[in-house]
Image (cartoon, helix red, strand yellow):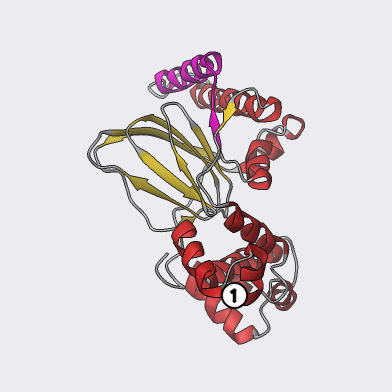
Amino acid sequence: MKDETSVSRAGYLRESYHYFHLRDTAGQELDFHFHEFDKIVLLLSGRVDYTVEGSTYALKSWSVLLIKHHTIHRALIDKSEPYERIIIYLDGKYFARSMPEARLTDCFDQADRSGRHLLLPTERQRRAIEAVLSAYEEAAEDSGFGAEALRESFIIQLLIYIGRMTAASSGETAESQYDPKIRRVLSYINENLGRELSVEQLAEQAYLSKYHFMRLFKAQTGSSVHSYVRQKRLLHAARLIREGMTVGKAAAESGFGDYSAFHRAFRESFGISPGSLKK
């Protein structure tokens, strides 16, 4: 995240889910970005660190990374080793509508609330996940009666397994490699997006001098304080607009005092105007 515009929206999802099984020696390296859909990353082999909202996780074999929509993240890939992973994009609203009582995507909300995005399955959980993914990939070659429904049933099984891991906390949850002072500041930002968030105020939350705080924040998140706050405010405004709030009120609720500056920043970040998003 080199400057204010380096966080970007990446990719679109036009179906209920999309499944990728990728093998290469480099992977697709993107700068900090976010998606409009939920995302599961399951490492099979290789070395990769994922930074999610300021927390950095060293993925282990069969670890499960949960990235909720609108969550800023980036992968740092060690190109010296083959990198194999399964990535699944999910339309959470689709699964919420189709099986509301199952709460299949609650695991993403829990990861977002707790700040713990990485799950390390037990051996038994790993075998269950491996079996359902193998069944899905075998069904991917099937074009017979009910093939699409069969494949979707395996995705639902996977979400159930992950949901049980999250709810019961039976799998080992991995601590992220972040400084507690920065985690405190990130939580404060999320809870106060409509208020003034100056560097001086945030440095006080971290109990650090302004310049020490700025250096530590940049090292931990890859972003300047100003860029991070600006992007979080834009994401918050976009969510409020989609939920039905007027554009002007959403801008104000997200901490933008100047509407023209908000409109310009919104278009730069999302590629559309706030009014178009509302429509």
Q: Which residue is mark 1?
A: 199
> Relative to 64, does residue 181 appear above or below in the rendering?
below
- Which residue is at 63% across, 41% downward? 111
Residue 227 x/y as whole percent: 51, 71
> Horizontally, is 252 left or right of 57 in the view?
right
> Horizontally, is 270 left or right of 203 in the view?
left
Closer-to-camera residue (60/182): 182
Amino acid type shown at disc 1: Val
- Which residue is at 58% across, 26% downward? 172
Dominant SS in magenta:
helix
Residue 88 x/y as whole percent: 48, 37
> Relative to 102, does residue 208 appear above or below in the rendering?
below
> Relative to 100, does residue 122 appear above or below in the rendering?
above
Q: Please state, as top left, top right, bottom left or bottom right, where the N terminus lies in the image.
A: bottom left
* Number of marks: 1
- Which residue is at 42% across, 72% downward? 3
Q: Quadrant of residue 101?
A: top right
Residue 66 x/y as whole percent: 55, 39
Residue 275 x/y as whole percent: 63, 74
Label 1 secondary element = helix
Question: Is the residue marked by circle 1 packed among few (<14), some (14-19), or many (20+) residues within 10 Å?
Answer: some
Residue 138 forms part of the magenta stretch: yes
One can see residue 271 in this view: no
The magenta segment is 118-139
Q: Quadrant of residue 155?
A: top right
Residue 184 forms part of the magenta stretch: no
- Which residue is at 51% across, 27% downward? 148
One can see residue 57 in this view: yes
Q: Please state, as top left, top right, bottom left or bottom right, where the C terminus lies in the image.
A: bottom right
